């Protein structure tokens, strides 16, 4: 799947997740997991050194946290922090996302 196909899918998935969360729908966590999966696909196509690539990596981790899939969030953060072209600030942000879950006592899936 190419980037031009993924971008509208990501946008729609984000909108769906936000609406589900706003109305307290039971599918909100699944919708956030879908966002994480799509953002991960974008991240595979774009280097971390590009703005869009960094945004996709942040989005993949953030959405995994929103889905309460903390193992996935941790795995993605570790993977993305290990990339040679990941900036120090991106690495810090990703680690902070995962650490904040641990500090809140997030349960593991």
Image (cartoon, helix red, strand yellow):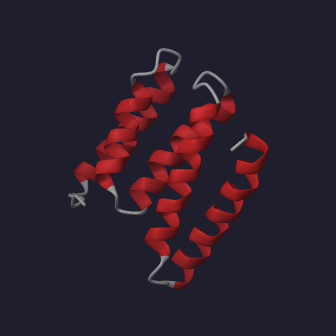
Nearer the observer, 26 or 41: 41
Q: Is residue 59 above or below residue 90?
A: below
Side of 50 where 25 appears, left or right: left
Q: Quadrant of the C terminus?
A: bottom left
Where residue 36 sits: x, y (%)? Answer: 51, 53
- Residue closest to the far front: 1
**Is the residue 57 above or below the residue 24 in the image?**
above
Q: Residue furthest top?
A: 84
Residue 76 vs 91, above or below: the answer is: below
Q: Is residue 25 left or right of residue 8?
A: left
Give residue 79's quadrant in the image: top left
Picture quarter with the N terminus: top right
Residue at 35 percent of width and 49 percent of height: 72
On the picture, is 60 further left or further right than 67?
A: right
Q: Residue at x 47, y 15 (%)?
A: 84
Image coordinates of residue 71 in percent, x first then y, are 28, 50
* Vertical relation: 42 (above or below) 38: above
Q: Nearer the viewer, residue 106 or 69?
A: 69
In the picture, measured across the screen, residue 108 lies left or right of residue 29, that is left
User: Could you say which quadrant of the image residue 46 lies in?
Assistant: top right
> Residue 90, percent across and down?
50, 29
Q: How many marks?
A: 0
Q: Residue at x 58, y 43 (%)?
A: 41
The residue sitting at 50% across, 47% down in the picture is 60
């Amino acid at each position: 799947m190419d980037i031009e196909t993924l971008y509208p899918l990501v946008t729609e998935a984000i909108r769906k997740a936000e609406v589900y969360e706003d109305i307290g729908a039971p599918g909100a966590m699944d919708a956030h997991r879908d966002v994480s999966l799509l953002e991960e696909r974008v991240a595979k196509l774009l280097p971390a050194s590009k703005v869009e690539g960094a945004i996709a990596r942040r989005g993949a981790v953030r959405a995994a946290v929103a889905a309460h899939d903390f193992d996935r969030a941790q795995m993605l953060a570790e993977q993305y922090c290990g990339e040679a072209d990941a900036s120090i600030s991106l690495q810090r942000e990703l680690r902070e996302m995962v650490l904040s879950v641990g500090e809140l006592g997030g349960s593991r899936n």
